[in-house]
Amino acid sequence: MKNSSKKNFFGKNNKENKKNSDFNYYLKNTNHSEKNERFLNNSAKKNAENLNKNDKNNTFSSLKRRKPLLKSKTEFPNKNLRTQQELTNKRNFDDWIWGKHSVYETLISERAINRIWCTSEIFSSDKFYILLKDLKSKGVLIEEVSWNRLSQLTYGASHQGVALQLACSKTISLEQLIDFSKHNCANPIILALDGITDPHNVGAIIRSAEAFDCKGIIIPQRRSAGLTGTVAKVAAGALEHLQVSRVINLNRALEELKKNGFLVVGLSGDSQLSISNFLEKSPLVVIVGSEDKGISLLTQKKCDHLLSIPLKGKTSSLNASVAAAISLFHFTSK
């Protein structure tokens, strides 16, 4: 009996203690969870309030801080590299030669040269001075530039202080052009370009000049596009059949042409004399000026006549190559 009572007593106590412990555990957990929920809710509210305040005061602050870092590290260098590669690809160096030995061999081989860039040390050296001075007298444009400028032109190549650009056709002297034109025609026509720097215009003028049986073309050393690959391409083969003379000074060349019986006429939109009213027949030198400035004032004074092309529409001027073609058609159809 004693043993059974003890068992019952201990059994009841165990059950009650278990219930009490479970209930206390439940109360503790629920209280703890409620506290956690209240803490989380309060913290969430505080964070939301802080975010709203920050958004109102500085809405795009984080974006502004991030974007410049990305651009400066990744986007900008890539853009610069792409731009530099595009510029390098656009520059065509097929007709360029640089380096002392390569340039020297080209000069003594008497190949057609459009332009030469060199440093003052190269120009005054014993090896190059006589050759460069002779080429300059023949109309080849020679520029003395700094070492850094030459490096820019050649995109950092090992130029050794000198570089040149080949011409697509050989040129002749003014005296040779005068003799050639007079021996092949009674009233020859020669075109002279004044300040036309666009190679597409020069190429188109050469094409029209050859098509209308012009005997030659005069290009000044400066302020004019040379006989580059673009000029030859636009000329569409006409450069192979037309004599070209590059002169140092255009006005002196016009005086020499006058001495040899040529009449000098210039195309000018401001002239009162229409080209349709010009009926003189004699050896002619037709001067074509640039589209924006026209013929220079000093060159206009060398002209015997200034002629205009009458326009009937609202357009006030013509492209230089178009004006040259119209004038040549008029002079050759008389």
Image (cartoon, rainbow, N blue to C red):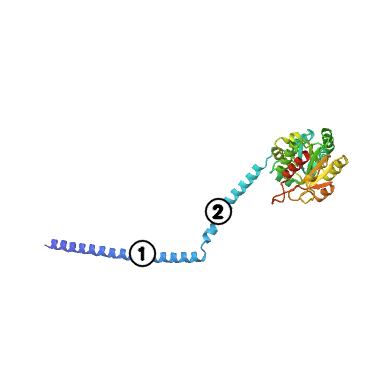
Give 96 or 105, whichever is nearer the viewer.
96
Residue 111: % across, % down: 77, 34
Image quadrant holding the C terminus, namely: top right
Mark 2 neighbour class, 10 Å CA radius: few under 14, some 14 to 19, many 20 or more: few
Q: Amino acid at mark 2?
A: Leu
Residue 283: % across, % down: 83, 39
Query: What is the C-alpha distance between the residues marked 2 and 1?
Result: 40 Å
Give 159 or 97, whichever is nearer the viewer.
97
Q: Is residue 13 left or right of residue 293?
A: left
Q: Amino acid at mark 1?
A: Glu
Mark 1 neighbour class, 10 Å CA radius: few under 14, some 14 to 19, many 20 or more: few
Instruction: Examine the image and state in which quarter residue 46 appears.
Output: bottom left
Give 126 or 308, whichever is nearer the viewer.
308
Q: Residue at x 34, y 65 (%)?
A: 34
Q: Where residue 37 is drawn, which disc sits there?
A: 1
Q: Residue at x 57, y 53 (%)?
A: 71
View extreme (left): residue: 1
Do we see residue 98 in this rendering? no
Residue 2: % across, % down: 13, 63
Question: Is 8 above or below relative to 316?
Answer: below
Badge 2 or badge 1: first in the primary sequence: 1
Q: Residue at x 57, y 52 (%)?
A: 73
Do we see residue 322 in this rendering? yes
Image quadrant holding the N terminus, namely: bottom left
Question: Is 215 above or below relative to 39?
Answer: above
Q: Which residue is mark 2?
A: 70
SS class, disc 2: helix
Give 2 or 283, whichever is nearer the viewer.
283
